[in-house]
Image: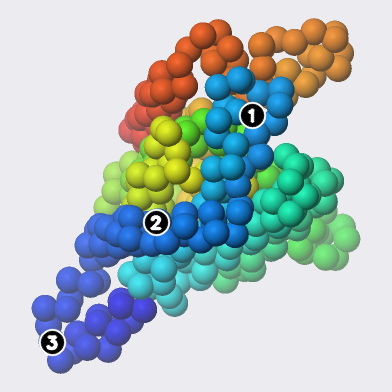
Amino acid sequence: MLYWLLYEKLFPYFHPFRIFRYLTFRTAFASLTALLIALVIGPFVIEKLREFQIGQYIREEGPESHRKKSGTPTMGGVLIAIAILLPTLLWSDLSNPFVWIVMLSTLAFGAIGFADDYIKVVQRRNLGLRARAKTQLQVAVSCAIAAALVVLQQFHLFSTNLTVPFLKSWHPAMTWTWLGAVTHLGWLAFLPFVLFVVLVLVGSSNAVNLTDGLDGLAIGCTIISAGALTVLTYVSGHVVFADYLELQRMPLVGELTVFCGAMVGASIGFLWYNAHPAEIFMGDVGSLALGGAIATVAVIIRQELLLPFIGGIFVLEALSVMLQVGSYKLRKKRIFKMAPLHHHFELLGWKESKVIARFWIAALVFALFALTTLKLR
């Protein structure tokens, strides 16, 4: 909005407004705007959630130290969504289709989380949407995003070819051209791409959701992941850096740097209130929205295969749950004292603050490794 007004409309009359054309400038101000919004409206949101008695239910089988958190305002993801989307609307080029895809993805996954949280609050139990219904909604949103990207691919604005870490010249196509030719329905050729996008988006949103179990843990890891995505998005859309690093050149995706910057700022602002001891929890509305946003950006910039490192802690948390459930069903034995993984370390005697700090350090190591792959090719 500000880009359109100050640069596209007023720049011919006032040349200093040309600064708004620079992506780095708008990204920095989007981040600062998101941070300011989160800090300013945070107390209001917390007070309103308390007023409506929207408090977190703590499951009885969890660590004993968590019982005192019962009743802490939840659904703080509404604050995160506002702090991300408003600066993106203000500072990005809204004629860019990828900006709208990422914003709508964030809203859609956030809406699923909102419905889940609302049911939990109304029914006063730590269950929300049925697992099948929740998954079906996530799959539907993921399919819609994949379909939008396939349409853009037809206009040569997007490529379904993968970027493989460490391999600079191999970009495998995620299409079955023979299937489209045989059936005379060309869109079926993109079935592998659609299925892959569904796997990435559903997996990422649920992984962030599983990580959201300690004060500041998920949002701290999100800051690190969003920071890494900011760098990856910028270099993917920059003609000089993309050529130098031999990445797929996608000029339009650079605009998503503004969104990623806003995600960093909003996450830092939310952490101010979510740090131990938390005054507010993000709830599913926040974790699903953030997980969906991170995955959508990774898909658009063709860095899905780096996502396990960009969000390394999220992946470990999700794997710990899958291994625990699989082991118990097959062997009737547990691998961890409790899943997700952060609870395992709590039950080993680690203080909550120590678990959070050490997981942040691990998340930073993962993200730095992801960035090193840009040159190790």
Count of picture labels: 3
Q: Earlier in the sequence, mark 3 or mark 2?
A: 3
| Residue 312 visible in the displayed image | yes
The residue indicated by pointer 1 is: 318
Q: Residues within 10 Å of mark 1 (few under 14, many from 20)?
A: many
The circle on residue 14 is 3
The percent position of residue 359, horizontal first and vertical second, equals 44, 23
Q: Amino acid at mark 3?
A: Phe
1 vs 3, front mark: 1
Q: What's the residue at 76%, 63% (across, down)?
A: 187
Q: What's the residue at 73%, 18% (across, down)?
A: 324
The percent position of residue 3, horizontal first and vertical second, equals 30, 76
The circle on residue 222 is none
Secondary structure, mark 2, is: helix
| Residue 296 visible in the displayed image | no
Q: What's the residue at 53%, 54% (across, down)?
A: 50
The circle on residue 43 is 2
Q: Is residue 95 left or right of residue 150?
A: left
Q: Are marks 1 and 2 in contact (CB under 8 Å)?
A: no
3 vs 2, front mark: 2
The percent position of residue 339, horizontal first and vertical second, equals 66, 21
Which residue occupies the foreground of this view, 243 or 313?
Answer: 313
Q: Amino acid at mark 1?
A: Ala
Which residue occupies the foreground of this view, 310 or 347?
Answer: 347
